[in-house]
């Protein structure tokens, strides 16, 4: 199984994406820890998406809005 992680800025958001090419799954049961992830994402006005296909792996993506004025000096705006 191969996995990859991506962390970067996209517009006014920071995006974290974690992918694997594992087994994947059908149906998304919120009781499998996803409900807690969604609740935490909501606390920072973030969007959480989980996409999975059997035999094609899973992608979890978190998009967090960032106020450009709050970025530390030296961070590209």
Image (cartoon, rainbow, N blue to C red):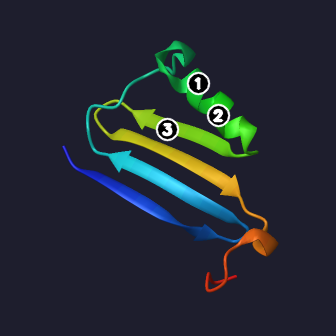
Q: Marks 1 and 2: in contact by CB < 8 Å?
A: yes
In 3D space, how far apart are the residues under numbered discs 2 and 1 (Cα atoms)?
6 Å
Report which quarter residue 49 is drawn in.
top right
Q: Position of residue 20 (x, y in %)?
A: 31, 45
Looking at the image, which is closer to me, 20 or 74?
74
- What residue is shown at x 67% (from left), y 76% (from top)? 72
Q: Is residue 43 left or right of residue 55?
A: right
Element type at mark 3: strand
Q: Marks 3 and 2: in contact by CB < 8 Å?
A: no
Element type at mark 1: helix
Looking at the image, which is closer to me, 27 or 62?
62
Query: Which residue is labeled 1 in the image?
Result: 36
Q: Is residue 2 left or right of residue 28?
A: left
Looking at the image, which is closer to me, 50 or 36?
36
With respect to residue 25, does 41 lie above or below? below
Element type at mark 2: helix
- What residue is shown at x 73% (from left), y 62% (from top)? 66
Mark 3 or mark 1: whose residue is earlier in sequence: 1
> Which circle marks residue 40 in the picture?
2
- What residue is shown at x 54% (from left), y 25% (from top)? 34
With respect to residue 6, does 55 lie above or below? above
> Which label sits in the foreground, 3 or 1?
1
> Which label sits in the foreground, 2 or 3?
2
The single residue placed furthest to the top in the displayed view is 31
């Amino acid at each position: 199984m191969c996995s990859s992680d991506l962390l970067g800025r996209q517009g006014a958001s920071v995006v974290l994406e974690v992918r694997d090419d594992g087994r994947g799954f059908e149906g998304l049961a919120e009781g499998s820890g996803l409900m807690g992830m969604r609740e935490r994402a909501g606390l920072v006005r973030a969007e959480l998406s989980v996409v999975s296909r059997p035999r094609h792996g899973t992608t979890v993506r978190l998009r967090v809005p960032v106020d450009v004025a709050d970025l530390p000096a030296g961070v590209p705006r």
